[in-house]
Amino acid sequence: MKNRIGVMGGTFDPIHYGHLVLAEQVRSELSLDRIIFVPAGIPPHKKELSISNNIHRHFMTVLATIDNPNFIVSDIEVHAQKVSYTIDTLHRLKELYGNDHSIFFITGADAILDIESWKDSKTLLKTFKFIAGTRPGHQNDDLERKISLLKKQYDADIHLLEVPALAISSTDIRNRVGMGKSIKYLIPEAVEQYIYKNRLYERGVSGE
Ligand code: NAP
């Protein structure tokens, strides 16, 4: 049987328990051998936005995953110094791990809605399997319509997984820090300490 790896893509600004619960649920439900977290380098759709620097997002992801032997972090995108496209990242990981690996790309459900605008989306959808985490109470009608269309058009393999812990969001955490509110129990303690030590998200701005 092929080895099965999950690739967890996201900006992770910052990583939180919703991401970690999603990754662990996918790993256990799909019997994946490991999950590789890939903090996005310069996300293609966020070239103009201010996000925390790559090194901070990479370190926070390492701290958050350090106690799980099945989770590893790749710096493939954060060190790229150019816009990162998922198709390039997944091909590179396939080269590194070998063709005997099945790759499942895991991310937030919103990504699926505009995935056809991504680089080489047709190849992406035909070659890799997708798991999309949805938040509780998320209205899934548009998403389900989109997924059945993508299945018909590209023979895409996409699964939705509702994760209650995804009620946590990175935007909310950044805002809470900016307003001086507690973020305890929303993220691993080491990540919380890292945020305060490096004064990230103060006054609502991203860490430089
Ligand atoms: P985003 O716009 O920051 O996030 C969209 C939504 O999805 C947010 O609600 C976010 O919640 C959630 N989300 C993001 N990553 C998640 C994850 N791994 N698990 C659960 N929820 C997640 O999306 P993004 O993080 O920049 O992009 C997601 C992935 O798609 C990245 O790997 C990115 O490189 C890739 N992407 C590729 C292309 C392309 O190749 N052209 C274009 C767009 C995106 P939180 O804020 O709480 O995480």
Image: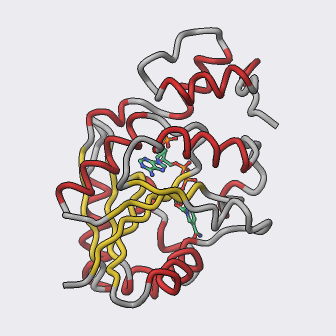
Name the quadrant containing residue 138. top left
Figure check: 22 above or below 70 = above
Q: Work out which residue is located at the far bottom of the displayed protein and give it.
A: 99
Say whether residue 31 is left or right of residue 109.
Answer: left
Say whether residue 101 is left or right of residue 61.
Answer: left
Residue displayed at 77% across by 33% down: 207
Q: Position of residue 166 (x, y in %)?
A: 36, 36
Q: Position of residue 50 (x, y in %)?
A: 76, 42
Quarter of the C terminus within the rendering: top right
Q: How is the image coloured?
A: secondary structure
Figure check: 174 above or below 83 = above
Q: Position of residue 187 (x, y in %)?
A: 47, 28
Residue displayed at 18% across by 84% down: 1
Residue displayed at 55% across by 25% down: 173
Toward the viewer: 128 or 96? 96
Residue displayed at 25% across by 83% down: 2
Toward the viewer: 67 or 30? 67
